[in-house]
Image (tube, rainbow, N blue to C red):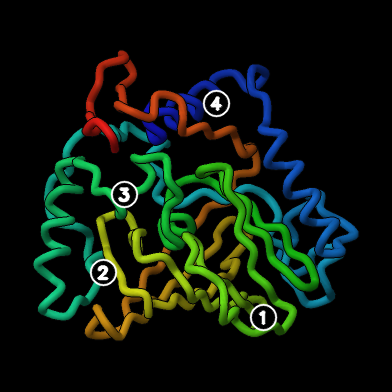
Amino acid sequence: MNPLARVAVSRRLFAADSSRYSPVRAVLLLATALCSIAGLTACSRNGQDIAAPQPGAGSSVPDWRGVWSGYPNPFDGGYDPFAPMEGPPPPGMVPPYKPEYMPQFQENLKQFMARNPIKGLNNGMFCKPSGLLGYMIGVYPMQFVIGPEVVVVVSEFENRYRLIFTDGRPHQTDADPSYQGDSIGHWEGDTLVVETTNLRTDTALGGLGEMHSDQARVVERIRRVDANWMEIESTVHDPVMLAEPWVVTRRYELRPDWHLQDYNCKENDRNAVDAEGNERTRLKAGE
C-alpha cells in the first residue's frame, strides 16, 4: 500500500477505536537504547511545562517530549495521495535555482504534479530513504530524545532515526555521503541550531523533485514556539545550483494522544493502490 494512504487509513482507525491500536515497540525500544548510549537519566514524558528543562538532558535543554506532526497535516482531512496536483506550488516552495538548473527542476515538478515518481528524487516511491528535508519537513510524526551530547530524532517515516551531535565535535572529513548527511548542532538558548553536510545527491531537498549538488549544506533552527507548536526553519546553501540560500519554514503540532506507528514500505512496494485496492501509480519493471 502506498505510504501516504497507509498512514491516512491507520490514523482513522486509531481515532475511531484507540483500544485496537498497538504502538510500534521497535521504534520506542530504539529511542530507549539511544537514551542509554547518550547518558540520559530520564526519557519518559512527564508533562508539558516548556519553561522547565527536560529531565536528564542538562539544565538548559528545553522539553520537547511528545509526538510532533507536520502542519497542515493532510491526514486530518480528505487528502488523496493518488490524485494529480493542480496549480503552482505554494509561494516559497520553489528553490531559487540558477538559470541553467531551472529547466530540470521544472521538468521534475511537472512529473511530481502528475504523481509520476522520479528515480533518485522521489525515493519514497522506491522504498529508499528520503533526503534530509524530506525527512524533517514531511507530514509524518516524529519524536525528539535530547541527551547531553546528542539529539535523536525518531520518525515514523521509514522507521528511521537521525543523530544530531551536540558535543562539540567537527564534521566528518572522510565519510561517504549519506541520505541524512552529517549533522552537528549546538544550542542557542532554547533553539537547536544544526548544520548538515555530506548529503547524497540522489535525494530531493523536499518533496517536489528539488535536486542539489554535492556541495549543498543545510542549516536548521529548531525551537518550540509554545506549548503546542514547534518550528523548524531550514536554510539550504548550494553554491553550485542555487542563486541564493533557500529558506523553508515548517511548523509541527504536538499530538498528545498519538504514538509512532509501524511503517513497512515493503507492503506492496511495486504498485501503489487506493483504499479500494485499485492500482494508481505503476512503476516500471526493474525500478
Q: In the structure shown, which secondary structural element does the residue marked by tag 4 occupy?
A: helix
| Three-letter amino acid code of the residue under disc 3 | Asn
Sequence-first tag of 4 and 3: 4
Report the mark closest to the observer, 1 or 4.
1
Mark 2 Cα within 10 Å, few/some/many (few <14, many 20+)?
A: few
| Three-letter amino acid code of the residue under disc 2 | Gly
From the viewer's perspective, is 35 left or right of 211? right
Report the mark closest to the observer, 4 or 3.
3
For the residues labelled 3 and 2, say whether their Cβ atoms are less than 8 Å apart.
no
- Quarter of the image for residue 105 reads bottom left
Residue where numbered disc 2 is placed = 92
Mark 1 Cα within 10 Å, few/some/many (few <14, many 20+)?
A: some
**Gap between marks 3 and 2 measured at Cα:** 20 Å
- Quarter of the image for residue 106 reads bottom left
Give how far across and how far down residue 117 sits, in percent: 24, 43
**Gap between marks 4 and 3 measured at Cα:** 29 Å
Q: Which mark is drawn over residue 187?
A: 1
| Three-letter amino acid code of the residue under disc 4 | Ala
Residue at left offset 20%, top offset 76%: 97
For the residues labelled 3 and 1, say whether their Cβ atoms are less than 8 Å apart.
no
Residue found farthest to the top: 276
From the viewer's perspective, is 282 left or right of 43? left
Q: In the structure shown, which secondary structural element does the residue marked by tag 1 occupy?
A: strand
Residue where numbered disc 3 is placed = 122
Report the mark closest to the observer, 2 or 4.
2
Q: Which mark is drawn over residue 15?
A: 4
